[in-house]
């Protein structure tokens, strides 16, 4: 005869052998509808943004069906004949114009990653080292200003500075020296585009790094100084590790835009240097889909470009997880 055991008051009996233990009551999340009701004010405030995102960003994805059709505007999307993967032949067969646009895109991206991406980090470190707050705010305002200029104005400024009749060549002529062809030189076009992006956006990107620098605990610098670390060792062992998460995040997002290097900026300067030197994938889609009315081929190239961008982001984020970083989303 077995004697039943009594459970003390205030305690629960242990689960049977082999069955998983129930989760603690404090760790159980309320149902989604209850969380939605609790945050109803925030949800209502976010609805206009969500609606705009769905209407102008996600709903147009349905138009990618054009990539599989011989789209004719007068027939419409539904009545245009289905051609399957025929529009992707320009990618598979290696069309010379497509390969040239791809090579230009990758080269400009590499230059921007190597030159433009580290620039905001260096600017943030320089601004953070300034002692005078008034001087720091003045420098920030000057560096941020170009970000608010349109590409039309930026290109016009560079033409006034480095064009044939610009400030640089006018000064060289006044000194009796030979002029320098910068704006219309195909060999310098990629460096010109990179320098424009650097001047326009490097100052604005420093906002993120300045915010990250402000979050680094000052006691870490004090402890490093007590251990005899100089400025360079503090930079290497304290500052850069504190910025590493943000650097990885921005680098992953930059990889997602690897195949997009600025349509408006390049299309404005294409007539000066020609398509061979300036055409990238975005302008290739415009020139072949809009100007040449080959809508299906342009949509196919744009679709492949978007899919490759997503794959690069996912792959880079997975690699970041392997190195212990959070990336753009957690596992």
Image (cartoon, rainbow, N blue to C red):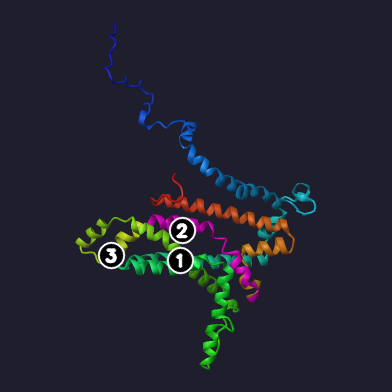
Magenta stretch mostly in which secondary structure? helix
* Dot 3 crowding, Cα within 10 Å, few <14, some 14–19, many 20+: few
At numbered mark 1, what does the secondary structure look like: helix, strand or loop? helix
Give the residue drawn at x 45%, y 34%. 38
Residue 190 lies, with reference to residue 167, above or below; the image says above
Q: Residue farthest to the right?
A: 74
Name which of mark 1 and mark 3 comes first in the sequence: 1
Mark 1 vs mark 2, foreground winner is 1
Where, by quadrant of the figure, is residue 159 drawn?
bottom right
| Residue segment shown in magenta | 244-272
What is the spatial separation of the Cα atoms under label 3 and label 2, in whole angstroms? Answer: 24 Å
Q: What residue is shown with label 3?
A: 233
Q: Are marks 1 and 3 in contact (CB under 8 Å)?
A: no
Give the residue drawn at x 72%, y 64%. 291
Q: What residue is shown with label 2?
A: 251
Q: Are marks 3 and 2 in contact (CB under 8 Å)?
A: no
Quadrant occupied by the C terminus? top left
* Dot 1 crowding, Cα within 10 Å, few <14, some 14–19, many 20+: some
Give the residue drawn at x 22%, y 62%. 225
Residue 177 seen in render: no
Which one is nearer the viewer's eye here, 283 or 69? 283
Residue 69 seen in render: yes
Look at the image and say whether residue 255 sits in the magenta stretch.
yes
Which one is nearer the viewer's eye here, 149 or 13? 149
Which one is nearer the viewer's eye here, 35 or 285? 35
Position of 186 with respect to 226 (left or right) is: right
Name which of mark 3 and mark 2 comes first in the sequence: 3
What is the number of the mark on residue 144?
1
The percent position of residue 230, horizontal first and vertical second, equals 25, 66
């Amino acid at each position: 005869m077995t004697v039943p055991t009594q459970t003390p008051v205030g305690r629960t009996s242990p689960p049977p052998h082999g069955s998983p233990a129930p989760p603690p009551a404090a760790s159980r999340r309320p149902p989604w509808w209850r969380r939605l009701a609790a945050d109803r004010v925030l949800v209502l405030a976010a609805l206009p943004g969500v609606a705009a995102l769905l209407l102008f960003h996600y709903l147009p994805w349905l138009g990618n069906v054009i990539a599989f059709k011989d789209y004719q505007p007068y027939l419409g999307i539904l009545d245009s004949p289905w051609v399957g993967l025929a529009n992707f032949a320009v990618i598979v067969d290696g069309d010379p114009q497509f390969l040239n646009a791809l090579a230009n895109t990758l080269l400009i991206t590499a230059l921007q990653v190597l030159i433009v991406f580290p620039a905001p980090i260096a600017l943030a470190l320089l601004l953070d080292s300034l002692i005078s707050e008034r001087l720091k705010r003045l420098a920030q305002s000057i560096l941020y200003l170009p970000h608010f200029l349109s590409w039309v104005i930026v290109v016009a400024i560079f033409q006034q500075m480095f064009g044939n009749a610009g400030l640089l060549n006018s000064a060289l002529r006044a000194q009796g020296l030979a002029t320098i062809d910068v704006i219309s030189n195909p060999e310098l076009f990629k460096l010109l585009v990179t320098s424009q992006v650097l001047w326009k956006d490097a100052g604005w990107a420093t906002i993120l790094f300045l915010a990250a620098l402000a979050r680094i605990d000052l006691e870490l610098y004090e402890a490093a100084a007590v251990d005899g670390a100089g400025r360079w060792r503090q930079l290497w062992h304290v500052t850069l590790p504190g910025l590493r998460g943000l650097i990885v995040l921005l680098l992953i997002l930059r990889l997602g835009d690897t195949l997009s290097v600025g349509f408006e900026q390049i299309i404005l300067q294409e007539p000066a240097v020609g398509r061979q030197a300036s055409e990238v994938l975005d302008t290739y889609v415009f020139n072949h889909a809009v100007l040449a009315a080959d809508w299906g081929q342009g949509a196919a190239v744009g679709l492949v470009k978007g899919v490759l961008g997503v794959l690069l982001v996912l792959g880079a984020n997975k690699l970041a997880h392997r190195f212990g970083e959070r990336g753009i989303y957690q596992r």
